[in-house]
Amino acid sequence: MSNERAAAPVVIIGPMGAGKSSVGKRVAKQLGVPFTDTDRVIVREHGPIPGIFADRGEPAFRALEADAVAAAMASGGVVAVGGGAVTHAATRDAMAGARVVLLTVSPEAVAERINGSDRPLLASGGIDAWQTIMDERAATYAELAHIVVDTSRRPMSHVVDDVVAWVRGTTGGTP
């Protein structure tokens, strides 16, 4: 049974702009496991996320996201989920049993990263909207996270190394 524990998926959560996709992809590569970015899966299967929000609304998007997370969890490896994925009960349920990494980022650092983005929840509010969303989700992020790694001003390689070391530690030293 310890083998099943070693195979428990690693889920990367955190606010938009924290680096979930970039970190997740590199962690998966170092561990030699599959990587799934659930936002990319949704875009591939259903079209651009801003369009889904505009045409069908956030609840419809969250339902698609919950399905994508459940499928990614079944595939295993490293899974990066959208910033708001944790707000949906079915998505949180789908993440049960995973090793959850919370990436955090300061408002100052994220402002540089999200400038000019087409992220639907930031369309009218920029960094103030980001902070409001972050404040609303902070408790849920903290509740789900097994480890917290800040990405604000650290080289990506250091963030990845910290996550890989933690994952290997949770599997008894094997990838």
Image (cartoon, rainbow, N blue to C red):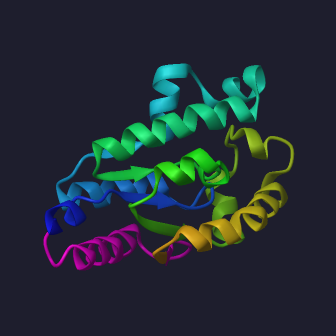
Q: Position of residue 78 (x, y in %)?
A: 33, 54
Residue occupying the point 33% across, 70% down: 157
Residue occupying the point 57% across, 62% down: 14
Question: Residue 173 or 164: which is nearer the viewer?
Answer: 173
Asked whether, in this view, residue 121 is left or right of residue 92, the answer is right
What range of the chain is rendered magenta? 149-175
Q: Quadrant of residue 160?
A: bottom left
Q: Quadrant of residue 24?
A: bottom left
Q: Quadrant of residue 28?
A: bottom left
Asked whether, in this view, residue 154 is left or right of residue 105, the answer is left
Mark count: 0
Q: Position of residue 21 (x, y in %)?
A: 44, 51
**One can see residue 82 in this view:** yes
Verify whether residue 166 appears in magenta: yes
Q: Position of residue 153 (x, y in %)?
A: 53, 76
Asked whether, in this view, residue 112 is left or right of residue 174, the answer is right
Residue occupying the point 16% across, 65% down: 1
